[in-house]
Amino acid sequence: MGAIRVVEVVGNIEGGGTQFVAALLRRMNPSRFQVTLVAPEAPWLADLCADVGAHYRALPLLSSRTNSGVRRRLGIILGVAEPDIVHAHGTRAAWYATRCMPAQLRTPALVYSEHLFSPDARRGLAKLPWYGLEWYLWAVRRMRRAPSGRTG
């Protein structure tokens, strides 16, 4: 069995989620995992990926919530990487990832890690759209199944 193909999607280049991904990349065994990191452009992330043998694809996920060019590019990256697992870190990364999953027979498993629950940073009615988005991401994640026949 070949290496498990993982695409890590991060919406920013600083903060707890990005630091978590950096620590994760340092600990993933390259003989077991083929990793692609999708994140905004940052020399330190490019250097980290080079050091650990991961592919780095710079993509400005924070540029817009609905940027069709970013969505199109992420879709291409996911199509080329053919991931077994897409691990999205944060609401925006998960939003883009769910909208860009390749439309193929075998869809990748989606793992969504929230490192700071977005509605907690907002007050009043401003929370409502974020709660709706979190519900949507939960529903999409629930509908996806891990690739069949994979163990370990």
Image: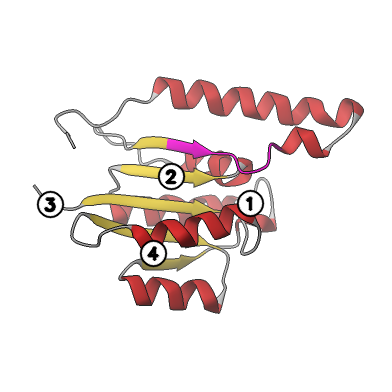
Q: Looking at numbered disc 4 in the image, what kind of residue is underneath it?
A: Arg
Which numbered disc, 3 or 2, marks the residue that appears first in the sequence?
Answer: 3
Is residue 34 or residue 92 the one in the foreground? 34
Mark in front: 1 vs 2: 2
Which numbered disc, 3 or 1, marks the residue that appears first in the sequence?
Answer: 3
User: How crowded is the residue under tag 2: few (<14 C-alpha within 10 Å), some, or many (20+)?
Assistant: many
Task: Find residue 36 and report its horizontal and vertical position in percent.
Answer: 37, 60
Is residue 145 or residue 78 the one in the foreground? 145
Q: In the image, what residue occupies the spot 69% across and 52% down?
A: 64
Q: CA distance from mark 3 to mark 1?
A: 34 Å
Q: In the image, what residue occupies the spot 43% across and 50% down?
A: 75
Determine which of the numbered discs, if any, sits on residue 111 in the image: none
The residue labelled by disc 1 is 67
Instruction: State yes or no: residue 112 in magenta.
Output: yes
The residue labelled by disc 2 is 87
Task: Find residue 68 and report its horizontal and vertical position in percent.
Answer: 59, 50
Task: Find residue 142 and report its horizontal and vertical position in percent.
Answer: 44, 21
Q: Is residue 69 something that shows in the picture?
A: no
